[in-house]
């Protein structure tokens, strides 16, 4: 029995590995290389040496395409050693085939590319009539919802409790309001006095002139309630005529004392400071700075006509048949005293 060279054994081993890888990939095993004619002997199976186990990474088991064993490895050059590159290539092929087998993925045979069907020519729209737009359905007359009525405002709740500060504010405002009302009332009362008839400050009727008047140029007639003297004059003072009746205020024009009529001297004399006045009220002497004041006399004639004292307070001439009314509300100040230079 002829012995095989190491190269032949190596070649048979590689061929065996290739067939094994092909069977694992489900492909047709490559034909066994023909042995040389001179060495047509049964193939001796040589057990493959144990290969190092290379486990594929479990995390990313990517299918590895097995090398196509369609072409058997080239036979080593007769009578020569294989190069390291060839050995490395065979080893890599072996490892790839083994990894594919372990992954159970067969290397798919490349299929011939099918001719892609020609795309159908796009239908060019010609003059296509646009369909008439469908009539819109008439909007249903949906009644509009009535606006919601505003809810009636709830009455504001008032805190019945009053704080001390609020109470003091209210009391202060009430006091101010009360004082204001009182001031206004007093002003109106003084501005528009309302005296009853026969009271000082209002109209003081003394009746018919014939019964009320004193004698001409006699002593005055006192009216205590009316605070005046009624005199009847027919004389001259400083060259001026004093004829008529006068109502003279009973208060001294100096400091307000009540002067008296002195018949002995036929004049008015003030007991306070000695001021003296004539029967007509004109100033004679004393500290007073003006003549006596007088009131307005209204003489109502039988025909209803009324005469009254002028603005200067001169004596009012009457006929004697009038009715006299003394208006104590209208006081005319006496003439001022002329001081010699
Ligand atoms: Fe009459 Fe003084 S008050 S003189």
Image: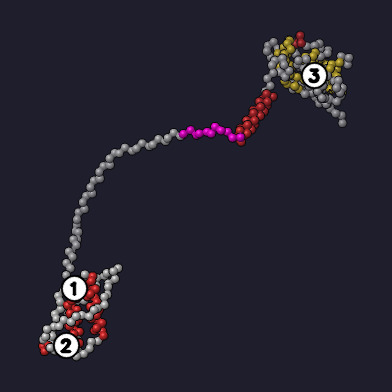
Q: Is residue 163 magenta?
A: yes
From the viewer's perspective, is 313 left or right of 150? Answer: right
Give the image quarter of residue 27.
bottom left
From the viewer's perspective, is 321 left or right of 160? Answer: right
Q: Is residue 50 above or below residue 220?
A: below
Mark linked to residue 4:
2
Q: Point out the residue furthest to the right here.
A: 264
Q: Is residue 331 above or below residue 209?
A: below
Q: CA distance from mark 2 to mark 3?
A: 183 Å
Of tags 3 and 1, which is closer to the observer? 1
Q: Is residue 231 magenta?
A: no
Label 2 CB-ligand 1 distance < 8 A: no
Q: Secondary structure at mark 1?
A: helix
Q: Is residue 160 above or below residue 37?
A: above
First along the sequence among labels 1 and 2: 2
Q: Residue at x 69, y 24 (%)?
A: 190
Q: Which residues are magenta?
A: 154-164
Give the image quarter of residue 68.
bottom left
User: In this orientation, which residue lies closer to the viewer: 126 or 89?
Assistant: 89
Quadrant of image for the C terminus: top right
- Residue at image mark 1: 24
First along the sequence among labels 3 and 1: 1
First along the sequence among labels 2 and 3: 2
Question: Is residue 191 something one can see in this rendering?
Answer: no
Of tags 2 and 3, which is closer to the observer? 2
- Residue at image mark 3: 250
Q: Residue at x 23, y 87 (%)?
A: 82
Ligand 1 sits in quadrant: top right
Q: Secondary structure at mark 3?
A: loop
Q: Where residue 321 sits: x, y (%)?
A: 73, 10
Q: Point out the residue furthest to the front here.
A: 1
User: In this orientation, which residue lies closer to the viewer: 150 or 79?
Assistant: 79
């Amino acid at each position: 029995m002829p012995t095989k060279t190491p190269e032949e054994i190596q070649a048979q081993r590689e061929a065996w590995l290739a067939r094994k890888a092909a069977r694992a990939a489900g492909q047709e095993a490559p034909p066994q290389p023909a042995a040389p004619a001179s060495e047509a002997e049964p193939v001796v199976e040589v057990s493959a040496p144990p290969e190092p186990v290379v486990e594929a990474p479990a995390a990313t088991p990517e299918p590895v395409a097995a090398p196509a064993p369609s072409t058997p490895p080239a036979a080593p050059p007769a009578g020569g050693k294989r190069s390291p590159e060839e050995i490395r290539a065979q080893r890599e092929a072996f490892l790839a085939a083994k990894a594919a087998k372990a992954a159970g993925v067969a290397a798919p045979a490349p299929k011939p590319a099918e001719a892609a069907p020609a795309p159908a020519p796009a239908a060019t729209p010609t003059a296509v009539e646009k369909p008439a737009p469908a009539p819109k359905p008439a909007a249903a007359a949906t009644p509009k919802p009535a606006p919601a009525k505003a809810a009636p405002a709830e009455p504001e709740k008032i805190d019945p409790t009053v704080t001390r500060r609020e109470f003091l504010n209210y009391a202060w405002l009430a006091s101010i309001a009360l004082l204001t009302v009182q001031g206004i009332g007093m002003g109106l009362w003084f501005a528009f006095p309302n005296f009853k008839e026969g009271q000082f400050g209002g109209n003081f009727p003394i009746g018919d002139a014939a019964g009320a008047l004193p004698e001409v140029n006699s002593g005055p007639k006192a009216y205590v309630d009316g605070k005046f003297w009624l005199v009847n004059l027919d004389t001259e003072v400083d060259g001026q005529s004093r004829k008529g009746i006068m109502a003279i205020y009973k208060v001294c024009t100096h400091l307000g004392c009540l002067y008296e009529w002195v018949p002995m001297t036929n004049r008015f004399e003030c007991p306070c400071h000695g001021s003296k006045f004539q029967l007509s009220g004109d100033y004679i002497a004393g500290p007073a700075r003006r003549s006596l004041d007088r009131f307005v006399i209204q003489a109502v004639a039988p025909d209803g006509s009324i005469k009254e004292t002028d603005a200067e307070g001169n004596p009012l001439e009457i006929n004697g048949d009038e009715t006299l009314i003394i208006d104590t509300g209208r006081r005319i100040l006496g003439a001022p005293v002329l001081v010699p230079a």
